[in-house]
Amino acid sequence: MPPRIGITTSYDDGTQSLDRRYVAAVEGAGGTPLPLPMLDEAATYDDLASLLSGLVIVGGPAVTEGLVGPLADELSPPSDRRAASDRAWLARARRRNLPVLGICYGMQLLNARAGGTIYGDVERQRDEARAHSPKRTGTAHDVRLSASSRLSDLLGRESLSVNTRHLQSVASVGDDFSVTARAPDGVIEAIEHDREWILGVQFHPERMGDTMAPLFRALVEHAASQTAPRSPTPTTN
C-alpha cells in the first residue's frame, strides 16, 4: 500500500479547504494524499495519526509564534482552530518520527515550534531584503542551496529559481535546524532538521511541476521506508 501522507488544510469561516496542487504533488510522487480534518478530541487526532506515514504542512496565513516585530499589514493571524490543528498534527508527526515537509507558512511553523523566531514583515525588518510577495511586486528569484544539505542532494543541484509568495520569513533558526538555502538578499529559503527527515521550504514546490517532483518523491520514499503504523500514543497537545 502506498504510504499515506497527511496534508493540513486552510480554514475560513467554518470551512476547510485545500489547494489541489498539494494533493496532485503527493499523488504524483506515489503517495496516498490524505487531507486532514480539524478535530476537537486528542484521542481522535491520535487515532488518525496512527494511519499516517508522513505529513505536509501547507501554506497559510501569518505565523504568530516566535514573532519578531509587527505583522505586515496585508497579513492576518491564523484562526485559533487552524493554529491548534496544525500544532496537533505536527506534534504527532514528530512523536512518531514521520517525515515532514513544511511549505511557506509550514516552514515558519516548524521553525517557531523549535524555538526559532519569525519576522513579522521581512522586507521592512531586515536590511537589504527585497520584495518576496506578488502583493509587493515580488517575482521569481534564484536561491542558493547548501552543498551538504539533504535538499541539494535530492534535487541534484546547488541553485535554482523559485517562486516567492511570502511577507514573513525565518529570523533565527530553531533548535536542531540548519539553514539550507538563501535568496540573493540573504533571506532564508529552506531549513532542515539536523537528524530527522524534516524539511521546510519558503517557496511553493507544489506550483513548480517537474522541478520539485524529486522533493515530493523523497518525502514519499522516506515515508514508505518507515515501519507499519504504530498504536496511537495518548497526548494532551
Image (cartoon, grey):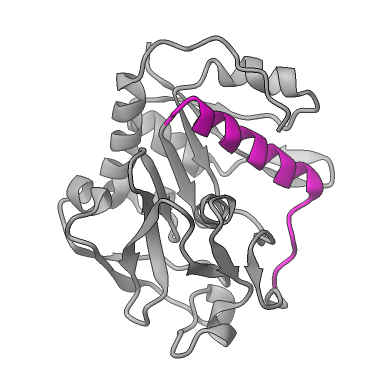
Which quadrant holds residue 204?
bottom left
How far across and down, in percent of the image, does residue 116 sit?
53, 61
Q: Quadrant of the C terminus?
A: top right
Which quadrant holds residue 160?
bottom left
Residue at x-position 28% and y-position 36%: 218
Which quadrant holds residue 2?
top left
Query: Given the current orientation, which residue lies at the most extreme bottom position?
Result: 128
- Determine if the magenta segment contains residue 106: no
How far across and down, in percent of the image, does residue 226 sit?
35, 20
Residue at x-position 62% and y-position 30%: 36
> Which one is in front, 68 or 204?
68
Residue at x-position 64% and y-position 19%: 46
Q: Quadrant of the N terminus?
A: top left
Query: Given the current orientation, which residue lies at the most extreme front position?
Result: 175
How far across and down, in percent of the image, does residue 97 sit?
44, 29
Query: Given the current orientation, which residue lies at the most extreme right position?
Result: 13
- Determine if the magenta segment contains residue 89: yes
* Whether residue 135 is situated above or below residue 80 in the rendered picture: below
- Magenta stretch in the rendered image: 74-98
Q: Name the dominant secondary structure of the magenta segment.
A: helix
